[in-house]
Amino acid sequence: MVDATAAAAPAGTPAPHGHDNYLTAGRGVLSWIFTLDHKRIGVMYLVAILTSFFLGGVFALLLRTELLTPGPTIMSADAYNKMFTLHGAVMIFLFIIPGIPATLGNFVLPLMLGAKDVALPRLNLASFWLWMFGAIFAVASIVMGAVDTGWTFYTPYSTTTGTAVISMTLGAFILGFSSIFTGLNFIVTIHKMRPEGMTWFRMPLFLWGLYSTAIIQVLATPVLGITLLLLVAERTLGVGIFDPALGGDPVLYQHFFWFYSHPAVYIMILPAMAIMSELISVFSHKHIFGYRFIAWSSIAIAVLSFLVWGHHMFTSGQSGLANMVFSALTFSVAIPSAVKVFNWLATMYKGSISLDTPMLYALSFLFLFSIGGLTGLFLGSLATDIHLHDTYFVVAHFHYVMFGGTVIAFLGGLHYWWPKLFGRMYSERWGRIGALLIFVGFNLTFFTQFVMGSHGMPRRYYNYLEQFKPYHQASTWGSYLLGVGFMVVAGYLLHSLFRGAKAPANPWGGATLEWETSSPPPPHNFACEMRAGDPYDLESLRFDPDTGGYVRKDPSSVRLAPAGAR
């Protein structure tokens, strides 16, 4: 139902700022706990996931502080094992996997479709509370003695250690259901709720990324869930599945785990790539180059992601033929990723690039993800992986892809849609300072680890030889700089909520439908029914000095009758 003010306004006129927006439409804690509004659910996810990120970041800084010197620095070897397990599990399962789909995806997807909500709002709310329930199980393991297996929970150690493996794995199992529910919801919403004019190849590329991600979530996550249940069954019932002492096979666990976990890498990175397509087009003020190639490459990555898990086990004793096949397939998945990077660079070519904060993160992504992807080729090659396996080279590669890719893209997307989320603008000056600090701190932290790994420094080690001390010290000081960068980002974003300038409906000049409603949006998103045009037709917009944002030259091109009138 549209409020009276919106109904009286011309079709498509955004609601006045602060009047009946989704943040103020319902009051009290219960209005949030039981909300079916995808925007509120996205915000709740955002708060919860950023809290997880903070917790995982604290663990990371403690790890790097311990590695400042050889031998004991601030914790014992046992505490170190538990700390890096918690860091990995919290960052992977509580932050990076759900990060973009659950927060920005939940908030933006219906708006990009011109819809009032996702197709299954109750399932959406259930997915959030399942995530919270799973997070409680995972975090409870800290007070139950923590876990010292590493985030992969490799057998047979995970079936014999006396730490809280059951609590952590049950938490991951529940989190898996949350991921499946989110993926199902997105698939149904994209299939059934596209507006008039939005054919498959007129969808924003962000939706293509979320759709491809959802396919992986639905098809791959059950494998991990079953694997973790088998692990719990082996620990509690003594059933011989993975433990060789009970007649099991630990390599079987690795196959099951990586059959999910390598596709999960693309659950993390595909939404990040999708954000890049939006940012690079908007801030280059140019139509996206090679739209269909980018769209199809998302589907290609989703398909190929299921075929490459075996490169994690080159040294596990699997057959030489299997190693060669998985090596070749690993190289093949680089092709659609390279297609995306080429098209992004082609979009920027001769574009009028604005170096606003979201674009700085996009440029950081291109640099860092390219390094992460290219170093992955070393690990996909049998000859070099034998030497680099389980060294800090793998740690650096992983973080360049996951942090330099997913986290940087998350920050870019968060800054891009922040005005839409909360109706406030942040300080561009401080935004650029924060982006610079994160970029420099990240490279100082992890590029040195490539050098360490190539020199033979094994990962997950509490102690190390004196020759690696300068590299570890540089990495630790870089992590402190990275932490300062995140504190700066948190500071100016929180400041903007209270003191930031009011945001116009379309501050950046994006042509996708979420910019056709007010900032923040009203409870039902749009005062009129929407019609989709070319999502990258930036020439259809003009800057309006009265509002300080961009407006359609012809509003009737995307706006139909008032909501409920047709």
Image: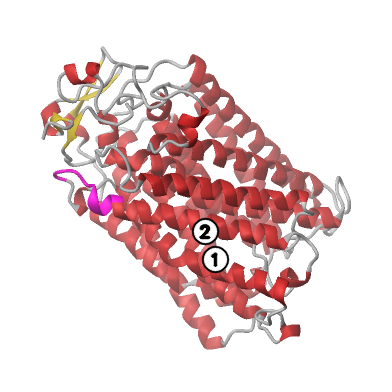
As drawn, 355 above or below 83: above
> Which residue is depicted at the point 49% across and 21% down?
497
* Coordinates of residue 17 in the picture (x, y in percent): 34, 17
* Coordinates of residue 49 in the picture (x, y in percent): 55, 42
Q: Is there CB contact under 8 Å for labels 1 and 2?
A: yes
What amino acid does circle 2 point to? Gly
Residue in front for this viewpoint, 399 or 17? 17
Question: In this view, which residue lies farthest toward the top?
Answer: 546
Please provide the residue range marked out in magenta: 189-197
Q: Secondary structure at mark 1?
A: helix
Q: Residues within 10 Å of mark 2 (few under 14, many from 20)?
A: many
- Image quarter of the C terminus: top left
Q: Please report whichever mark, 1 or 2, sits nearer to the chain's N-terminal start.
A: 2
* Coordinates of residue 37 in the picture (x, y in percent): 38, 36
Q: Which residue is mark 2?
A: 176
> Which residue is depicted at the point 24% across and 21% down?
543
Q: Which residue is mark 1?
A: 225
Query: How far separated are the C-alphas under marks 1 and 2?
Result: 6 Å
- Image quarter of the N terminus: top left
* Coordinates of residue 224 in the picture (x, y in percent): 54, 67
> Which residue is depicted at the point 54% across and 49% down?
131
Q: Is residue 193 magenta?
A: yes
